Amino acid sequence: MSLLFTLLATLFLNPVLYEDFSDPDAIRVGNDYYMTASSFNYIPGLPILHSQDLQHWELINHALPYRLPGSGDSLDINTAQHGNFVWAPSLRFHNGKYMIYYGDPDRGIFRVTTNDIRGHWDEPQLVIAGKGLIDPCPLFAKNGKVYLVHALAGSRAHLKSVLLLTELNADGSRAITPSRIIYDGHSDNVTCEGPKIHEFNGFFYIFFPAGGVPAGWQVVARSKDIYGPYQTRVVMRQGSTKINGPHQGAWVDNGEGKHFFIHFQDVGPLGRITHIQNMIWTSEGWPVIGERIGNAQCGQPQETAPKANDGKAEIKNSMKNSAMVFQPHNWSQWQWNYNVDMRSCFIIGDTLRLFSLFTPGENLWLSRTLFTRRISGNPLASPFASYYFTLELNPDTRYSGERGGCVVFGKSYAGLVLTNDKGSVALQYIKCDNADKGSAEQKKTLIGSLVDRKIKVRVNIYDNPPVPGNTDRQVTAMFLYSTNGGITWQQADSEPFKVREGVWTGARIALFCSRNDDTKNDGGYLNVYP
């Protein structure tokens, strides 16, 4: 590990997770902190992370390991569902049970539960059916009732900027009253969403972001009556910092009187990264998050992240440790871009075998068999992250154009691909701008025939500051290949590839094997070696 990165870890600088964990929510159970985040169309979904100090996080489980509840129609089954399914979850612990509520914008609000957060989670239960219901958060109130606050997705419900409340049954598994609007943010806090509700010191508090993801602010509403009316106060905004749109997250305490707020920042191609802030309570009973702005009752994000405790926490496989970036064959860090297809892969020790399956369309955008991982790295290093693979294509000779490889995947993508061309395996550099719009790939042959059908490839990711007036990081990728086992490397293209984000997510490293013929019963495969 570099000296600079060692200093970074020692100083506990924000972000604490320079990795795409959107809409984080967290709880403390005893001395342990647990966090989950939106996973959208990716499976395993609903990641579970663990920490003992809010600084160092380990991915320990997924609450949706195999399947997303879908509609079952042919479109749902056969094509990718970018940005759909699992939005803005809430994690809670009540009466010995862990539970996560999440919104599916096309189907309703679901809940998954377990008695062992590291073990098996039950299948999702539909708590409220409906289109456009998102961002749920339950409250097991002191009066014995169970409530759930949620927001609306304007793209489905045709109304946004409101918060709603419903009452649930005693175990929180289903709604027993219709949802009812309890707060209208159209005048002061447009695009209010992601509510987290708490009962504290005689008030009901709802923490929520407003103003949109790139440039919004954090609000708290409070009322003596859970149905309102609610007073509101802006408790954190960007201020004079470079941390744009400090967005929704979680209020946690350390059990010893210290309070913290975990939130995300959208940086574009690298997704939504995680920050932690101090939180204090004023004598009037309002929180202030981050560093107080002058004499205002509002804070701005801190560059130095607070620590939850002064003791030395046990740190295992910290996701803040850059060593994880250089272990691409830890397949537990990888996700499919849709429901697991049992036909897709076979893992033999460290070796991944991807079987060739039909992919519709002019590019990879509609493929539902991309094996992906979030991009994570060291913000003080150049490159920010590097990934190494040895690829070997074993094609079926009945096909022409069967292929497999590695790409950096978002709304545009590029990468290195082995393709079967009339019985010979060639190495190509492919690039597809505006893949989400159906654009065709550009292809450049680098090696016309690989004798052993095998090549070593490397992907370097570079992270640069945004241009003035923008909030997105300028992220680029360079693709390299080696014909002598990594002794020397050649660039696939003279120009770096400009990385773009996906739908509500950052770009990803993706491995795939596909063919354009769906008439045959079998095909070839791609081996990926350490």
Image (cartoon, grey):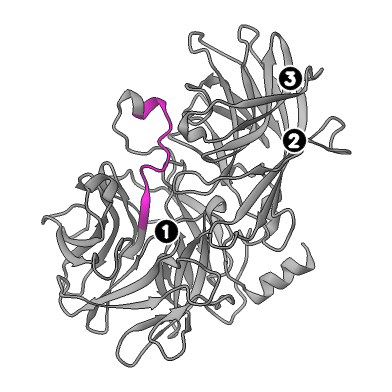
Real-space CA distance between mark 2 and mark 1, rounded to the nearest whole angstrom: 36 Å
Position above or below: 523 against 355 = above
Q: Which amino acid does label 1 sit on?
A: Asp
Asked whether 233 or 495 is in front, the reply is 495
The structure residue drawn at horizontal position 52% and vertical position 69%, both measured from the top left corner, is: 243
What residue is shown with label 2? 493
The structure residue drawn at horizontal position 52% and vertical position 33%, both measured from the top left corner, is: 435
Residue farthest to the left? 177
Q: What is the count of numbered marks?
A: 3
Q: Residue 23 carries which label?
A: 1
Query: What kind of element bears circle 1?
Result: loop
Asked whether 203 or 381 is in front, the reply is 381
Q: Nearer the viewer, mark 3 or mark 1?
A: 3
The structure residue drawn at horizontal position 47% and vertical position 35%, both measured from the top left corner, is: 436
* Residue 432: quadrant of the picture: top right
Q: Residue 97 magenta-drawn? A: no
Query: On the picture, is 83 further left or further right than 191?
Result: right
Q: Residue 81 magenta-drawn? A: yes
Real-space CA distance between mark 3 and mark 2, rounded to the nearest whole angstrom: 16 Å
Q: Residue 154 carries which label?
A: none
* Residue 211: quadrant of the picture: bottom left
Q: What stretch is highlighted in magenta?
A: 76-89
Q: Where is residue 159 in the image (x, y as percent from the top left)?
A: 22, 53
* Quadrant where the C terminus is found in the figure: top right
Query: On the picture, is 193 further left or further right than 12?
Result: left
Q: What residue type is labelled 2?
A: Asp
Q: Earlier in the sequence, mark 3 or mark 2?
A: 3
Query: What kind of element bears circle 2?
Result: loop
Q: Where is residue 509 in the image (x, y as percent from the top left)?
A: 61, 41
Asked whether 143 or 431 is in front, the reply is 431
What residue is shown with label 3? 426
Residue farthest to the front? 469
